[in-house]
Amino acid sequence: MSKGVQPAFIINLQKARLKEVENLWSKYVARGSKEKIQNNKGEWTMIGAVERNISPSPFTIYALMLETTDAVRLTTFFYELDTFVDFSKATEEKVLAIKKYLTDFAHLVQIEQVKSELEREKKSLKALEDNKKSLTKEFDKGEKNIAESRRKIEKNESEIKRIEKEIELKNSQIAQQKDVIIKLNNALGDEKKVAQKTLKNLEKEKSNLYKEKEKNSKEIDKCNADIRNGTKTQEKLQKQIEAIANEIEKQQQKINDIQSKLNAIPNPGIKL
């Protein structure tokens, strides 16, 4: 450090990241003080730190932070009354107070870590729930489409029955009209021509009825095809929804476990 080799209190903050430790430390040591923490090339200095359990008067804390692969090593130096606190010479009460001061900070770091982890997993849960909601909406829409296709089939089948009755009636009318034409075979004037024209119109109407029936039949075929395709899609969606529901259940359990981990961390009750 800048003051030469001095007695230090060291704590390793497991799984922490340097940026988050720096941010929390700058807030933690500034509590109750009117002074601001200073950072000079990685050496953090808090002049006028306040912690009654350590000292009745404001004191100075120097800190160095080193990020490793799995932790941040926090090396601290406590300076009061023109002397660095030496754990081998200081009173037991002061050493315990400093250890608690650092342990409380370590717990705050842990709490923030687990809270961040909890938020990430909650976001993952929400993404799963949103996906399930979207698939369920798509599934419900598919069910409505299948139901609509079935209604169309019923409507077209009913229409075909009506058309078939009309065709029967038209066949009867055509047969009668043919009889009329036979009886008018030797008739004079336009009477026979009128009867033949009437027959032609009846046959045309019958032909139109067959075309209408064919149109209804094609609509039924289309609806049946839509139902078959829709049913396959629904089966796939159902499997996807069930799979996501299972993932949601696992994710919720993961969140519960993280919450339990958070609850198990001693909370110093310090607001930063």
Image (cartoon, helix red, strand yellow):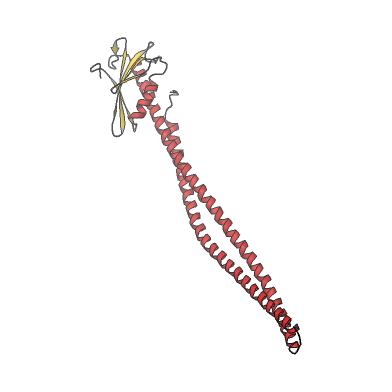
| Quarter of the figure with the C terminus | top left
Q: Residue at x 50, y 60 (%)?
A: 232
Q: How many marks?
A: 0
- Return the residue found at the far top: 81
Give the answer, above or below, for where 270 lies relative to 144.
above
Q: Which quadrant would residue 26 be assigned to in this image?
A: top left
Give the answer, above or below, for where 1 lies relative to 209.
above
**x and y percentages locating residue 39 in the rendered image:** 32, 21
Residue nearest the viewer, comparing 174 with 81: 174
Q: Is residue 102 left or right of residue 207?
A: left
- Return the residue found at the far front: 189
Give the answer, above or below, for where 126 lies relative to 103.
below
| Quarter of the figure with the N terminus | top left
- Return the residue found at the far bottom: 186
**x and y percentages locating residue 192 in the rendered image:** 73, 84
**x and y percentages locating residue 240 in the rendered image:** 47, 53
**x and y percentages locating residue 160 in the rendered image:** 65, 70
Q: Which quadrant would residue 198 be assigned to in this image?
A: bottom right
Q: Which quadrant would residue 171 be assigned to in this image?
A: bottom right
Q: Is residue 122 left or right of residue 218?
A: left
